[in-house]
Image (spheres, grey):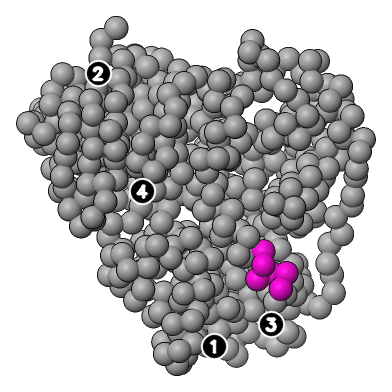
Amino acid sequence: MTKVIEFKDFSFRYKKQNEFTLHDINLTINEGEKVLILGPSGSGKTTLGSCINGLIPFSYNGEIKGSCKVCGIETQEASIFKISEHVGTVQQDTDAQFVGLSVGEDIAFSLENDMVPRNEMLEKVKESATIVGMENFLQSVPYNISGGQKQKVALAGILHNDVDILLFDEPLAALDPAMGMAAVDLIDKVYKEKKKTVLIIEHRLEDVLYRHVDRVILMSEGRIVLDTTPNELLKSDLLKKNGIREPLYISALKNAGVKFDKDDNIDNIDELNIDKYKKNIIADFKKKKKTVNLSKEEKIIEIKDVTFKYGDFTALKNISFDICKGEKISVVGKNGAGKSTLAKLLCGIIRPSEGEILYNGENYLKFSIKELGRIVGYVMQNPNQMLVKDMIKDEIELALKLNGFDEKVTEERFVETMKMTGLYSMRNWPVAVLSYGQKKRVTIAAILALQPSVIILDEPTAGQDYNHYTEIMKFITDLNENFNITILFVTHDMHLAIEYTDRAIVFADGEMIGDDVVYKILSNEEIIERANLKKTSLVTIAKKAGIEPEEFIEHFIEREKEERNNG
């Protein structure tokens, strides 16, 4: 087999850091392989990708030891232009990758740089756009399309270069569940039709395994922990140990006491031999069932017949529901459904076109944005839109100082928040060296330090590995339970909804189409389809075992809560 990527005794240290980020990497990837590079935030997986596509050493300076060859080229001795002829990258933050004023212009960018004749260029742009399903959006502005469409445009822009390797850096981070499945489908389609070597850098294991992967490279603390098949990895106990969430159906099987045999194939739930595990599943299911009761005590927020329009476009239509003190609510739905618009309305960033919002019985129009900011903390989806300081310490302390906290309280809250969010060891780091996931934690920490009455977190788990996600969610849960703080999660993460919220409010096309306990929402196939949610693997395994999905999900939720409380 032809080697297209080869690391030998490779280590790398960023110029601004004292310690090496990558240690003694020995890795060979062959032509035509589809490989998942898996690992927690800060494990070095994005740095490894940057070595492959030439960003290291040509954009990020540092010390290199050993060898990294791409298509036979020693990267240190080449140029980023030379490497780009072999490696095409779709970045995690697709907004940072756009350079054109329209989708068509953006797809054509590299062709223009290569001075391809216009007639030939137009054909190539149309061909690439058609492959990814964006041929009808060539005149659209890139920043006005959905997250899933942005991924498609970024991919189209590198397809016509006929590169050998396609590198996807956390392609699912900003996508709703259905869009995530579509992205995995698209990557698989290009892999098969174009015969490319495909590398996917992700920590959302279950979502990536929706389609076949040849190998999984598990990384932790800058080292390769395991290089194996998905099937063997799922049977091991290395996922949770290394900060990666197990697929829900694997957790359910392990909860039921299932022991996997050497010959068991468990990496695809649709091919799972459920009859072998059915006895365990049913026996475990019979042990315990509880009912989650929705809290409807003290109303803290009332949304009454609220409509909001961006110009002529109606983003929310006649929305009405109450939020009670101390609730934990997941706000879910497809990209563009109105979830983020709702969050901005609650914070007062925008105000209703029609209807009213009451805080503790008072119309919130009387409050300024600054006054509302002391009541409602809002953590935005994109951390780069919130970060304003060069150093982490300055970023966390900024809101505290602006809100009049003295030096002693500011320092105490800074230290406490740093420890609770897992950022204490990085407290004196510059923001510029942080990964996307680490930046996300900094923005969450900055809001949590203020201890507002209501916290709205827009996609809090995007870019977060399981360990850091668990730490943050534990901290948020403690705030909820110990101080009765109301928490709203605007999220695509069905795992978060299942594990950490009791109530789900569902949006689709600007309308509220569901408001109920989580296990009822996530077992309602009509709502799942309309809202672009993903039918969880718990529904699939319950149906295969002959159990009512709603009750099975409820039981799973209680088991997970017990495990967290006992852990």
Q: Earlier in the sequence, mark 3 or mark 2?
A: 2
Quarter of the image with the N terminus in it: top left
Could you tell me residue 359's position as x and y percent?
69, 82
Which callout, 4 or 3, points to the residue nearer the camera?
4
Say whether residue 157 is visible: no
Q: Which disc is residue 371 wearing?
A: 1
Q: Find disc 3 in the rendering and name its residue.
A: 359
| Place of residue 109 in the rendered image (x, y in percent of width and height, measured from the top left) | 19, 38
Disc 2 residue crowd, few under 14, some 14–19, many 20+, Cα 10 Å: many
Q: Residue at x 34, y 76 (%)?
A: 394
* Residue for point 24% across, 18% down: 4
Q: Which mark is residue 93?
A: 4
How packed is label 4: few (under 14 Cα within 10 Å), some, or many (20 or more)? some
* 325 sits left or right of 533 in the view: right
Using the rendered image of the protein, determine whether residue 279 is visible from the camera's viewpoint: yes
The residue located at (36%, 73%) in the rendering is: 393
Callout 2 secondary element = strand
* Quarter where residue 352 is shown: bottom right
Residue span colored magenta = 477-482
> CA separation, marks 2 and 1?
57 Å
**Label 4–label 3 contact, CB within 8 A:** no
Marks 3/2: CA–CA distance: 59 Å
- Check disc 4 and report its element: helix, strand or loop: loop
Q: CA distance from mark 1 to mark 4?
A: 32 Å
Image depth: mark 2 or mark 1 in front: 2
Q: Which mark is residue 4?
A: 2
